[in-house]
């Protein structure tokens, strides 16, 4: 059971928009920044979003992040088949004094 | 260009100690700007935080693994290592080494190794 809660799967058609939620508590998301990671099949995860809503160099602006209270959301517009991957949210948990992840969300582009 | 490379046995017997090393190139493990850590992923499952180490030796571990895990840094070799004792089949996973930014409310994994599969079996 993961500390952060994500939907197991989401799907949408090419060109459409999708959002992935990440729910936590005051000990983690509520008082810390959230990062998002993309894991393409058979590869290591890659940083997509840091500090709730910032994109590293090379990440397109059709990828976005937001946070409100104890929840965070990843948004992807203009979906492409290459976006099919598992997506994970992560942050720090002040009660555990450790990092925590969501259980991951599998994105299918229909 | 930063590169992280995991190395170590791919097969460990139950009750023994899993040992992995991450060799860092393109950056120094002595940097005061970063932590260095380990994350694992059991087959077909999600990511699990194992722990991190700072160049000073300061560590933070997942409480569920705390009694079995040790992470340490070797600045002379620009490496950091993981030891997980008393392993069982539940410890079978791909183990990733990574570079992290841990500053105040910020926890960001900005670079990952390619991962190393470790199987626990007799």
Image (cartoon, helix red, strand yellow):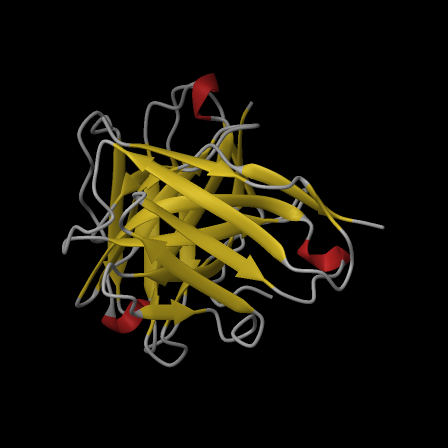
What residue do we see at 75% from left, 61% from top? B88
Front position in the image: B2 or B109:
B2
Residue B96 position within the rendered picture, expressed as x and y whole percent measured from the top left: 48, 43
Residue A85 position within the rendered picture, expressed as x and y whole percent measured from the top left: 50, 31
Q: Quadrant of residue A30?
A: bottom left
Picture layout, residue B3 above or below residue A101: above
| Number of disc labels | 0
Q: Quadrant of the N terminus of chain B?
A: top left
What residue do we see at 45% from left, 41% from top? A87
> Which residue is most to the left?
B32
Residue A102 position within the rendered picture, expressed as x and y whole percent measured from the top left: 47, 57
Q: Is residue B19 left or right of residue B51?
A: right
Front position in the image: A68 or A35:
A35
Q: Is residue B34 left or right of residue A45?
A: left
Residue B63 position within the rendered picture, expressed as x and y whole percent measured from the top left: 50, 75
Q: Is residue B80 left or right of residue B46?
A: left
> Which residue is most to the front?
B76
What residue do we see at 32% from left, 29% from top? A77
């Amino acid at each position: 059971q993961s500390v952060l809660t994500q939907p197991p799967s989401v799907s949408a058609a090419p060109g459409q928009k999708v959002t992935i939620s990440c729910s936590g508590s005051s000990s983690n998301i509520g008082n810390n920044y959230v990062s998002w990671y993309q894991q393409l099949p058979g590869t290591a995860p890659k940083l997509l979003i840091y500090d709730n809503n910032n994109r590293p160099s090379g990440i397109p602006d059709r990828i976005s992040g937001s946070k409100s209270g104890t929840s965070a959301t990843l948004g992807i517009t203009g979906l492409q088949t290459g976006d099919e991957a598992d997506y994970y949210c992560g942050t720090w948990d002040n009660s555990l004094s450790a990092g925590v992840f969501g259980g991951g969300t599998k994105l299918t582009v229909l | 260009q930063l590169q992280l490379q995991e190395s170590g046995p791919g097969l460990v017997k139950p009750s023994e100690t899993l040992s992995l090393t991450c060799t860092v190139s393109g950056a120094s493990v002595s940097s005061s700007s970063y932590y260095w850590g380990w994350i694992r992923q059991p087959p077909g499952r999600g990511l699990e935080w194992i722990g991190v180490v700072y160049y000073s030796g300061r560590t933070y571990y997942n409480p569920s693994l705390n009694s079995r895990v040790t992470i340490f840094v070797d600045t002379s070799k620009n490496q950091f290592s993981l030891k997980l004792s008393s392993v069982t089949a539940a410890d079978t996973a791909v183990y990733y080494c990574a570079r992290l930014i841990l500053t105040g409310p910020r926890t960001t994994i900005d670079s990952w190794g390619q991962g190393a599969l470790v199987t626990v079996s007799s």
